Image: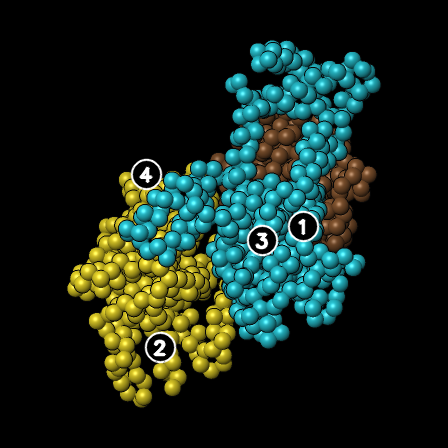
Chain colours: A yellow, B cyan, C brown
Amino acid sequence: MISQIILSGLAIGSVYALMALAMSITYKASEIPNFAQGEMAMISTYIAYVLLVVQGISFFWAFIFALLFALVLGLALEFVFIRRAKEPNLLNLIIITLGFQMMLYGLAGWKWGADQRRLRMPFSETETYDLGGGVVVSQLGLATIGTAVVLMLIIWLFLRFTKLGLAMKASQQNAMAARINGIRTNRILSLSFGISSVVGAIAGMMVAPVTTLDPGMMWDPLLKGFAAAVLGGLTSLGGVVVGGYLLGVIENLFGFYISLEFKSVVAFLIIVIVLYVRPSGLFGRHYVRKV
Amino acid sequence: MFPNSLIQKFTFIPAFVTTQNLQPHGLRSLRCIETSDFFCIYNLQCRLAGHIMSEMGFAFMSAEMKRSYYEDIQPLKGWPARVWFVVLVAVLVAVPFVIKSYYVYVLSLMAVNVIVALGMNLLVGNTGHISLGHAGFVAIGAYTTVLLISGAGVVFPVALVAGGLIAAAFGFILGIPALRLEGPYLAIATLGFGIAVTIIIGRVELFGGHMGLIVPKPEIAGIDFSGDRALYYLVMGIAMLMGFAMRNILKSRLGRAFHSVRDSDIAAATLGVNVARYKTLSFAISAFYAGVAGGLWAFVLGFINPGLFSFVLSILFLATVVVGGLGTILGSVLGAVVITFLNLQAESIQHVPVIGEVLIWISQNFMTVSGLPNVSWIFTGLILILIVIFEPLGLYGIWIRIKIYWRTWPF
Amino acid sequence: MPENDFFRVEGLTKRFGGLTALDKLTFSVEKGMLFSIIGPNGAGKSTLFNCINSLYRPDEGKVWFRGKEITGLNPHRIAAAGIGRTFQNIELFANMTTMENLMLGRHLHMKTGLFGAAMMFHRRSRAAREEMVHRERVERIIDLLELQASRDKFVSQLPYGTRKVVELGRALAAEPELLLLDEPAAGLNNEEKEDLIFWIQDIRREFGITILMIEHNMQLVQDVSDRILAINFGKMITEGEPDEVVNHPEVMKAYLGG
């Protein structure tokens, strides 16, 4: 029984982990917690829905186009709004992402109304595989976990082995030095927003078939993803992924054994406790200012 | 008329410069000036000149003449400020008799939000923390006040203060982990607190669950304050009192300590400021303001339920202080007024002549008509972004610009 | 008997990982003295100040001040005990005016509480009266350090040299009995350095403060110090009268790298 609950925890944890990863990529590049992440994913998922269900394009191409859209949306957020801020400080930037989030939410509500729709995926939720020992996993759950793992691997390889990935890392660590060495840090910043938007969009497309497709669908995954990212330490990509899975599993265990009603509370309670003990999350480094 | 005022400006300058040269040691030497009538007039001229110079951007000549150190901390310094204050109070008293009762309600809401914003600004603007859970404090204040009155029969003023104090206690507790947290880490901790409060309130029978509670009539010494106007006067009076109290706190030793913690907690500690105490204190005061505002909000609305105190409300509070102007009282007021107005009235953009027609046309051809109210979200979001991008100091910065523009008009 | 000394550091040790920044450092300062600490970069001078202030927790050793042990007290308690300081890289409150910075120096001596502050509506209210009393003290420091021109400016707008003076003024406003100056002359031009020497002597005369100073500028150190302690790699090289220390072969070696 317990392994079944852990497994379904891992499935929802994949979503949290991807949202956390998306948060962390932008945060590392710009130190902005991007609150529009969830709504950007929601809009991209709607695009996939329109292409797939309304226009009737094949799943593969709908998926690709939606991700391209997500990339453009991410670039647009950075280029149109974030870059325009004069003398930006953290709070102003947070307000910009919150404002962008409101705009996207309103746009989705205007275009598609508050109706709950279904995004049909080629993976079924009812078809299940028996992993032995009574542990069952649905096709969709398996696909979710699989996609997340593959995506994380791709991101890791990208950051580790490509020239662009190294440039991203360099400008995250010391923007000034990177600029002196000929890296266009502005473009890197745009790119970080674009990439994280794509990662978020994939998370959105994984959430939509499980819950429903509506303008408010990414609220919970966003907050949990943010929480997971903080739990894992925000600046450590590996850490935030672990944080996501951890949060998914703990939440599921708590929901099953103790109280389903207070499931969401416990997630945040754990985070407050963890932060009290380790102020920069489980895997984050804590910097002490020198005088 | 204008050329005349120009001449006056320039003839005052030499006089001003001479006194400055004679009085390099600031205030103490100025006291003796008062003894002579001649110097009194002289002093007045200097003040005028100093004023104009400062507005013109000549900061080095801008030192205004003062008679006592108290003038630096005095509320409503100088007669123009006093006159404007009296005018403001008169307008606020008269206004409910002129406008529709719905707008009296809107004004009351604005006053309530001003109180929250004052507290929020102390925390965010003056002490340099972030909070995404202020709706939680407002909820605690609202439920405590209502339950104390309807459940325990406590009188209204006591219940209101008690609501604030209970919220302050929670603020103090939340402030303890906050001592070690910064930026996004603190954001998520406060966010978790706000969400936890809403969920717990929604699940507990005592708090009326999801249905919430009906708010009793507010009564002080047998007088019923439940009418729109009466409630408006009550809320407005409390908001004004709390605004002045906050101003005094910020001008005093405590205000400087809060600022010092924001700017450099290390230096603050080596000067004897108990950093931990001031951080938790700012959380507690901030929560007190939110709690009192919550109690008043309950009476303005007439009902409370957990859905009111959502995460979105916390975001709006944060947006209020950032958009209004961080660390200033006027910023809190301007922000609260504008955000409340947007929140309630953004939908009326559909009724604006040309824009409304265009929006309806777009809705019919590209979007859904049923989704039209969502335009208010787009509108609000866009305004937040534009204010923050083009005026980092917020509405307060815009206000200062307008002021300088008018004072120095011919230039 | 350490209780008899005004200020005494005993066997102070601080390690950062494998690096020993302070190695069993022991010295004492008599009341009214100007005691300088010299040493090359990275000798552990600022670490010493940070340990005295409790910004770092020393691994071993004790700090005594006026007969009481103050090792490991909270930084604000150490300030309350009467130790003030300035910083090498200026730690002013950048978004406050010069006046507010100096008034914050008076924090320890003011008593206004939350309620008193909120009720500061009238010039005869207790908070307002206290404010004015302390304002008077701060004006005196402004006059002494000739800061009138920058009184109402935000410190972020002031030039570097003036900021150093403001920081000195802020430390003075707290009326410490022992003042720690961390490289007060660093980054100042010659004229400002001369002013500084003049002020340090003035401060000692007017306020009777004991000063513990870290400084690189040998001229300044020789001019104003009563005693000098030379350290390198966290260890004491020598201690004594200015002339002896400056001409000590080990000190010359440490400075010239020979």
Residue C49 in the image: x percent, y percent?
Answer: 61, 46
Amino acid on which disc 2 is placed: Ser
Q: Residue at x 63, y 12 (%)?
A: B8
Q: Residue at x 76, y 46 (%)?
A: C119
Marks 1 and 4 sit apart, C-alpha to C-alpha, by: 64 Å
Helix, strand, or loop for circle 3?
A: loop
Q: Nearer the viewer, residue B37 or C160?
A: B37
Marks 1 and 3 sit apart, C-alpha to C-alpha, by: 59 Å
* Parent chain of label 1: B
Marks 4 and 2 sit apart, C-alpha to C-alpha, by: 48 Å
User: Which of the two marks, 3 or 4, is nearer to us in this view?
Assistant: 4
Check if mark 1 and mark 4 are on a common chain: no
- Most extreme residue toward the bottom is A133
User: Which of the two marks, 3 or 2, is nearer to us in this view?
Assistant: 2
Residue A26 in the image: x percent, y percent?
Answer: 36, 53
Q: Quadrant of the C terminus of chain A?
A: top right
Q: Quadrant of the N terminus of chain A?
A: bottom left
Q: Around disc 1, counting alpha carbons within 10 Å, would you say few (fewer than 14), some (14 to 19), or many (20 or more)?
A: some
In the picture of the structure, the residue carrying the numbered disc 2 is: A8
In the picture of the structure, the residue carrying the numbered disc 1 is: B229
Residue C72 visible in the picture? no
In the picture of the structure, the residue carrying the numbered disc 3 is: C56
